[in-house]
Image (cartoon, rainbow, N blue to C red):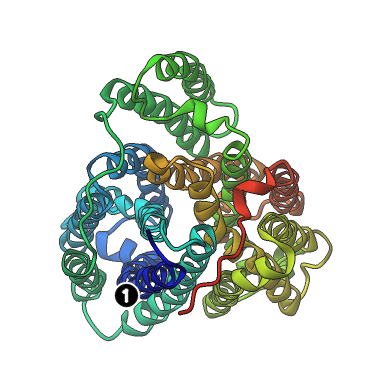
Amino acid sequence: MSTPGSTQATARSHVHSLFAIVGFLVCVEIASGILQGYYTPIFSDIADHLDIADADVNWFEASQLIVSAIVIAPLARLGDIVGHKKILLLSTAVTALGSWVLALAPSFGVFLVGAALQGAYVVWLPIEVAIIYRRTADTGRQNLLTRRGAAVLVGALELAVIIGAVTSGALVTATSMTVLLMLPAIVVTIVFFVIWFGIESVPGTSSGRLDLGGLAMLTLCLGLVMGGLIAIRLQGAGSLLAWGLVVLGVAALVPFTRYELRHDEPLVDIRLMRAPGQWPVQLTAFLFGMSVLGAQIPLSTFARTDPEVAGYGLGASAGFVSTLIGVYVIFLAIGAFTLPLTTRLLGPRLALVASAVLVAVGYGMWLLFHDQTWQALLNMAVAGLGSGALVAALPATAAAAAPGDRTSFATGMTNATKTVGGAIASAIFAIALSATGSLDDPTEGHAPLAGYMTVWAVCAVAALLAAASLLMLPRHVAEEPEVPVVV
């Protein structure tokens, strides 16, 4: 029979070892942030290096979105079956391979393959949250510690985005493109060994095997939808082929859902996804992806537009756009780091709702205030605060609402739905700005201001809908009694 003293000692031991694990996982998120920030400032230089048009750079983003949307569900499921560390190692190895391919690619086609392979990093954060959630099972405050751990990871991620962007921008003229592109590959390779030696290997908590039939059907659904969305970006809203692909992809979800409901070990647990504690979180991730993934290119092109020519825009230099991104990312980090404080003040559910409202307010402010640089900075700061908290909180909340053998799946699906939301929003925004190639090269012409208004309005409305859905989240999912643990 355990005594209160022995229980506290056990909890202390778990928490102390958790600190060490989070420290190693921070290294992984630093690598993730570098990957997400490193390439953006030098895309034009990469285009020159590969002798391609700047507009073709969009294919890199498209290839990563497709791969990320397809691989995250099976990798997350495998994490529950074979163990989280093994999948973290596998995805890191694939990401490292893709990064080395990018560095050594002799042509555009090979570079595109590298960019696609690099998309495997999308599963890192969900797997890490699942590791923390499992590691805190016996502490008495599992949800609280998971939220705190996720906040630290996301904060490290966002700070690393800035480090990556600043580093590549500073070195682009000081060394060759090959050497420049080797640096993130080296970082990811080092992180592979950090995971190997620093993270404990624990067997999977779920029985069964990977649902290959479900994987094939999901790949078909996502491939058709994503292919259609890319076709819309390339051919415009009037393309019958593009819309036909989208309709076929959506229609394919019906037999996929029926198949998964009949399967004993489904790839996508439909019953879990529609549970009261899951669907508000997954719907929020989808809606949140519209702004956090879909709105960045339009914001950049708006800032670069010369108001003397178009009648709107900030006339900003590339340096100011980097500053704008930097401010946004800094406030993302602040939102993530302060999540435990806002959770303590408002409670877990209301903290999520408030974060979504901040995103809505930030993008809603663009509708009224978009003429001055300080207004742009303020708008992105407000949106960044809410976005950072959501990035940290959504995987942790999904894990709290999932059975112990499905935590990796639940956290992974938040990234999957976010990616799909971003891809759909990207297509919608391309249509809104289709008066010109402003998504590819703002010097070729300018979309009407109404197009940018549509972008901001969609982001704001999507965030408000996310806040409304989070109000439907059961209180018991995110909240738990505090158990005193001396740390």
In percent of width and height, residue 159 lies at 46, 77
Does residue 266 sit above or below 447 in this rendering? above
The residue that appears at 26% across and 44% down in the rendered structure is: 204
Residue 426 location (% of width, % of height)? 55, 45
Q: Identify which amino acid the numbered label 1 is placed on.
A: Ala
Pinpoint residue 433: horizontal percent, then vertical percent. Answer: 64, 47
Q: Quadrant of the N terminus?
A: bottom left
- Label 1 sits on a secondary structure element that is helix
Report which quarter residue 179 is drawn in: bottom left
Q: How many badges with numbers are in the image?
A: 1
Kindly give the residue lying farthest to the front in the view shown.
1
| Above-or-below relation of 172 to 458 | below
Q: Is residue 267 above or below residue 375?
A: above
Residue 306 at least partly seen: no
From what the image shows, is residue 432 above or below residue 339? above
Residue labelled with disc 1: 20
Residue 203 located left or right of residue 367:
left
Image quarter where the C terminus lies is bottom left
Q: Percent position (x, y) of residue 7?
A: 42, 67
Residue drawn at (53%, 61%) of the image = 392
What is the crowding at mark 1: few (fewer than 14 residues within 10 Å), some, or many (at least 20)?
few
323 vs 480, nearest the viewer? 480
